[in-house]
Image (cartoon, rainbow, N blue to C red):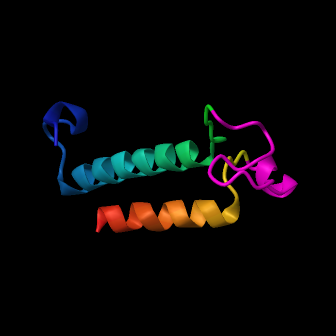
Amino acid sequence: MDETYIGVFADESDRASAVEAIFNAEALGDARRKAQPETHPDFDGRHCVECGERIPKERLALGRVRCVECQTTLEHQRKLMRA
């Protein structure tokens, strides 16, 4: 932890608060990035970029470019790659 950020005379409580603030800021940034509409060069605005099936309007309103099935497959693949 950088002493200039939390202060040279900070006590344990101040350091814990600084760590918590950093954690919260990072979590908020991650949540904002995940909530943004997806983009893909092959997306035509109506069909899944993976299988070509039409995406329901509710899912399109969320800014998604894959159908539920393809998104689920993608998430499972990503999860396996992390393990």
In the image, taking residue 56 as reference, residue 42 lies left or right, namely left
Q: Quadrant of residue 82?
A: bottom left
Query: Taken as a whole, is the magenta stretch helix, strand or loop?
Result: loop
**The furthest residue to the right:** 57
In the image, residue 53 lies at what x, y percent? 76, 55
In the image, residue 71 lies at what x, y percent? 60, 60
Where does the C terminus fall, quadrant-wise?
Answer: bottom left
Q: Front-most of 80 and 63?
A: 80
Q: Front-most of 2 and 8?
A: 2
Note whether 3 is above or below 65 in the view shown: above
Query: What residue is rendered at 83% in x and 57% in y?
Result: 56
Residue 60 highlighted magenta (yes or no): yes
Note whether 5 is above or below 21 in the view shown: above
In the image, residue 77 lies at what x, y percent? 43, 64
Residue bounds of the magenta highlight:
42-62
In the image, taking residue 5 as reference, residue 73 lies left or right, namely right
Q: Quadrant of residue 12?
A: bottom left
In the image, taking residue 77 as reference, residue 52 lies left or right, namely right
In the image, residue 4 lies at what x, y percent? 18, 30
Residue 20 highlighted magenta (yes or no): no
